Image: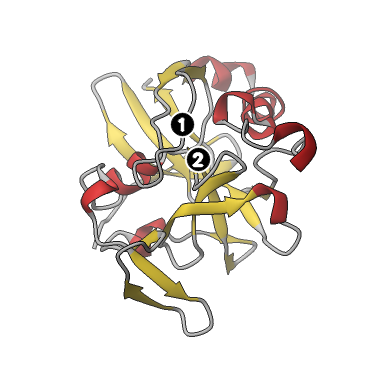
Amino acid sequence: MIFMETIKFGAYSWRVLEEQEDKTLIITEDIIEIRPYDSEFTDENDFGNLIWESCSLRQYLNSGFLKKFTTEEQNRIIETKLSNPNNLWYGVGGGPDTTDKIFLLSLEEADRYFGGKGDYLGVIRKDLDFDAGVYTKKEDGGYFSNDGDAERQASYEGIPAFWWLRSPGIHKASAAAVFGNGGVCVFGLDIGALLDVICGVRPALWLKKQ
């Protein structure tokens, strides 16, 4: 079991993922809202070109969501250079490095900060029986599950729900996500088929210590 400290910042409760001498990495305790990874996506104009750098969710987090904090709070949020690795299972490009104040976790971070080693390439691949809620080992499965599932689990309005990661899925019209049970979907959710899927946002940021 992983025990994480929680803090209050702005209007939200946050979990502490990492402490450094002058800054702290935090992620919201809950899913704060339901938003698509990219609201402008269509099969016609974006298929094969959907990455963190250009998605509407990144733009929102670093503009509209950022403005929900006071000027003093915004000054404590550190602009951070992020690497956007390729999907290790499917080889899909994650795009160039970006510089963000507020961001989503990557697949590597969703593993490393919740009990793994940050390299999911070698973990046991699994399939998920959605009806039974049971994982089974499968050589080409699209999911992984480990001791960090319970801590990765997050709710929206009290109900466990999916939340986005910034990494690509099996193709560039999909994005990786964490399931309501805390398992990680490396395969990703197809952005073009989200009418029946509720997937939310857990922002993360590096906070300057006072």
Residue sitting at x 49%, y 18%: 98
Is residue 184 toward the left or the right of residue 116 in the image?
right
Q: Which one is nearer the viewer's eye here, 141 or 144? A: 141
The mark nearer the N terminus, 2 or 1, is 1
The residue tagged with tag 1: helix, strand or loop?
A: loop
Q: Where residue 104 appears, x then y in whole percent?
A: 50, 37
Where residue 24 sits, quadrant-wise, is: top left
Location of residue 73 by image quarter: top right
Of circles 2 and 1, the one toward us is 1
* Helix, strand or loop for disc 2: strand
- Name the spot of residue 17 as percent of width and height, x first: 33, 40
- Front-most of 17 and 128? 128
Question: Residue 191 vs residue 109: left or right?
Answer: right
Question: Mark 1 belongs to which amino acid?
Answer: Gly
Residue 173 lies in quadrant: top right
Which x, y percent locates residue 95? 49, 25
Q: Is residue 92 left or right of residue 66?
A: left
Using residue 25 as the reference point, say whether residue 3 is left or right of it: left
Its colouring scheme is secondary structure
Q: Residues at badges 2 and 1 in contact (C-beta under 8 Å)?
A: yes
Is residue 68 visible to the viewer in this orientation of the structure? Answer: yes
- Which quadrant of the figure contains the C terminus? top left
| Kind of residue at badge 2 | Pro
In the displayed structure, 78 sits above or below 137; it is above
Camera-side residue of 70 and 190: 190
- Neighbor class of circle 2 (other Cα within 10 Å; few <14, some 14-19, many 20+) is many
* Residue marked by disc 2: 168
Q: Which residue is mark 1?
A: 93
Question: Is residue 152 depicted above or below 50 in this figure?
Answer: below
| Residue 31 visible within the image | no
